[in-house]
Amino acid sequence: MSNPLDPNLIPRFVNQLVIPPVFYPKTIYNPTTCEIISHNYTITMTKFLQQILPSEFPRTTVWGYGGAVIDPSDGKSIIKFRNSPAATFEATRGIPINVQWINNIFSPHSLPVDPTLHWADPNNLGMVIPDLVPPFPPGLPDAQYPVPVVPHLHGGEDHSIFDGHPDAWFTANEEKTGPEFVTTLYHYPNNQLPTTLWYHDHALGITRLNVLMGLAGFYLLRDPKNPLDSNESVLPSKEYEIPIVIQDRSFNTDGSFNFPNVGNNPDVHPYWVPEFLGDTIMVNGSVWPNLNVKRRQYRFRLLNGSNARFYNLEFSNKMSFIQIGTDGGYLAKPVELSSLLLAPGERADILVDFSSIDIGTELILNNSANAPFPNGNLPDPLTTGQIMKFTVLASCITRPTNLPETLNKIPKLSANSKTRTLVLLEVAGENGPLEALLDGQKWSAPISELPIVGSTEKWELVNLTMDTHPIHLHLVQFLISTRQTFRAMDYMDDWIKINGEPPLNHPTEVLPVNDYLEGDPLPPDPNEAGWKDTIRANPGEVTTILVRFAPQESDKDLAVPGVNLYPFNPTSGPGYVWHCHILDHEDNEMMRPYKVVN
């Protein structure tokens, strides 16, 4: 059996950053007008070896999405490509994408599947008694195989059949499927604002495992009618636009991933841990890479693709940079920053100017976020405190152009429907939490969030835990309204008095939070003042968001309760979910279904 690899033995900044290529579609044209009808893809999920560590170390077994790409070496040949993270989807606003997803993972899961959790369970084991779960490896054979998967386009405005519902999973050859499964041919309309989306696996109860194995990639949506997307004199051209996904991992000496196989409370959950925090930083599928840059401005599309780790990013020379976009599109105006906090699932579109940096300068992108966030330990400055290196090589200087003062028109939303007060809870165990909950309810409790199509709701996220939870809603982009501190212990005591001790398998009674608020409500940070699909709900705070169940650019006078403005019917199909994007929490009850109703 292989031993854990000491991260201090891994040379840093010897790998060169891998820039994922772009999937190549089959383009379908209208035979009469010659206009593009759709871009079609066939994407497989497979197991393979990849050189993630420096070349003197063994390769790592990963899973990834594979398909046709343009060969980066000549820019014109079409080749088959598979990698982790996967190739990027380049989508055009108004042109739909159809993807045939194929599960070609025919071997048992490489990581410990905990069958004491509520999970996909293709062999219908039910909730297995902890005493019957053997140590991993090999684990419980009927839990380890076959492997269920289901892709989710994170941040996409899509019909729920194509949203990657956690119970819409399927195994290899679709031999077994989940209770909400309909099809593996997904349709993405691409009608929303241009932005940085990403896709990843979302199978019930094993998302943390499938994503860690490598099932994730970028999905960039562009709008040729938007000057920021079409005018290369405003933003850097595609040559200088680089997607960067940051993920933490731990390794064994044989190159394999080292993932916990003993839980914090193994007598309840033999394998599950509250947060996986790796000791090594991986960027675009390589540990601690270097990127050689020219003396010019670059556009970096940043994604925190980690299971649980937050990142507070800043350059070693303390230089500033400009954020132009967030989860759901461009900000209203550029925001100058010297540091950037990203929770799991969040994205940031930033501009970094190297034009005034001397040739030969080496800059480190550092991380200072505690783990778990915000009250955990500081990162090791020599390992998880470093992300990647930038080396300034080219001598030519290209000065950045001036950005327009206004990048996007962000509407002012006001609630015209229900206010929801929703608590974030953990159930305590002897050695840490046993599970995490939304509004005190388990996944299997009756659906309690039934928003009316076209309505705008106010959601008050009342955090009664010690962690910051990145809360993600499927289908919609929303706007953050305020954050405000409150008397958390008093509120928790009173909430339990009226609802009982969690976990609950029934709808909860609302306890208004107004009487417990303290201080003044704070507006969102300037770089959060745009469309979001994942928001940080901090401990001891009430985070209020405005959620409109209509497309982003809907006319405010038309987006009213009962009127569907989507190009599909969001009230049909299996429905959607909202959850914590700490994947270890999501996999253990911190996820709830919701359905849009008419």
Image: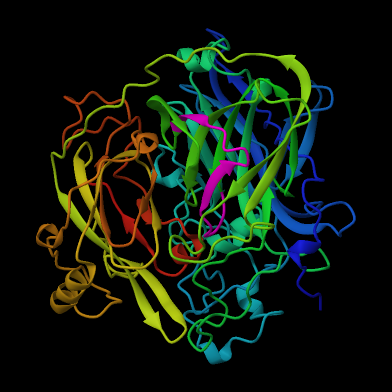
Outermost residue, top direction? 33
| Residue 529 vertical position relative to residue 505 in the rendered view, above or below | above
The quadrant of the rendering that contains the N terminus is bottom right
Rendering coords of residue 323 (x, y %): 47, 30
* 316 in the magenta segment: yes
Instruction: Identify whether 460 is placed above or below 193.
Output: below
Label total for image? 0
Nearer to us in this view, 309 or 97: 309
Q: Residue furthest left?
A: 515
The reply, left or right, for residue 252 in relation to residue 232 is right
> Toward the viewer: 319 or 418?
319
Give the percent coordinates (x, y) of residue 111: 66, 69
Q: Is residue 125 left or right of residue 507?
A: right
Q: Specify whether 105 is left or right of 228.
A: right
The residue closer to the viewer here, 422 or 160, is 422
Instruction: Using the rendered view, name the quadrant where residue 276 is placed.
Output: bottom right
| Residue at left offset 16%, top offset 40% | 415
**Residue 457 image-quadrant placement:** top left
Residue 296 coordinates in the image, percent (x, y): 66, 20
Q: Nearer the viewer, residue 180 or 204?
A: 204
Q: Residue at x 67, y 67 (%)?
A: 109
- Residue located farthest toward the right when viewing the structure as drawn: 56
Q: Is residue 184 visible?
A: no
Q: Is the C terminus in the top left, top right, bottom left or bottom right quadrant?
A: top left
* Magenta-colored span: 305-325
Examine the rendering and report whether any part of residue 268 can be seen: yes
Question: Does the magenta run of residues contain 470?
Answer: no
Q: Which residue is drawn at 52% across and 79% down?
A: 125
Q: Residue at x 55, y 31 (%)?
A: 220
Q: Position of residue 414 (x, y in %)?
A: 17, 36
